[in-house]
Amino acid sequence: MERFENVIQISAGTIIKTVLILLLFWTIFFLKNLVLIILMSIVIASAVEPAAQWLSRRKIPRLLAVILVYLSLAVALICVVYFLVLPLLSESGDF
């Protein structure tokens, strides 16, 4: 019966790549709040972009268009809270 020996060789390049990947993951974990803020800002900017482009095509300056979109979103959110959430909470408290 013959016996075969398996030899595993790990090169220096593999060790360096592993250390760099672990360092990258540690850095992302350490800066997770910053990464989350950047991702959230990208999502918000992507949501605002179509409305800003639509207003820009109607001869409204882009800065004013973005400000109008943000103001309309803030007013809509305030109206939802004022007209829906507050009465719902008061009625559920009375219930």
Image (cartoon, rainbow, N blue to C red):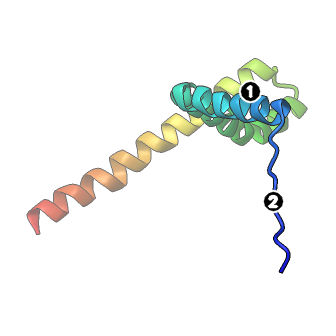
Q: How crowded is the residue under tag 2: few (<14 C-alpha within 10 Å), some, or many (20+)?
A: few
- Location of mark 2 (residue): 6
Question: Is residue 69 visible to the viewer in this orientation of the structure?
Answer: no
The residue lying toward the viewer, choosing from 73 and 8, is 8
Q: Position of residue 92 (x, y in %)?
A: 17, 64
Instruction: Report the disc number at residue 65.
Output: 1
| Quadrant into which the C terminus falls | bottom left
Which numbered disc, 1 or 2, marks the residue closer to the eye?
A: 2
Residue drawn at (42%, 40%) of the image: 78
Could you tell whether 28 is left or right of 14 in the image? left
Using the rendered view, name the quadrant where residue 58 is placed.
top right
Residue drawn at (60%, 26%) of the image: 27
Q: Position of residue 47 (x, y in %)?
A: 70, 42
What amino acid is at disc 2? Asn
Residue drawn at (37%, 47%) of the image: 81
**In the image, farthest residue toward the left:** 94
Could you tell whether 87 is left or right of 4 in the image? left
> Tag 2's secondary structure?
loop
> Tag 1's secondary structure?
helix
Q: How crowded is the residue under tag 1: few (<14 C-alpha within 10 Å), some, or many (20+)?
A: many
**In the image, farthest residue toward the front:** 1
What amino acid is at disc 1? Ala
Instruction: Report the disc number at residue 37.
Output: none
| Quadrant into which the N terminus falls | bottom right
The residue lying toward the viewer, choosing from 8 and 32, is 8
CA distance for labels 1 and 2: 67 Å
The residue lying toward the viewer, choosing from 50 and 15, is 15
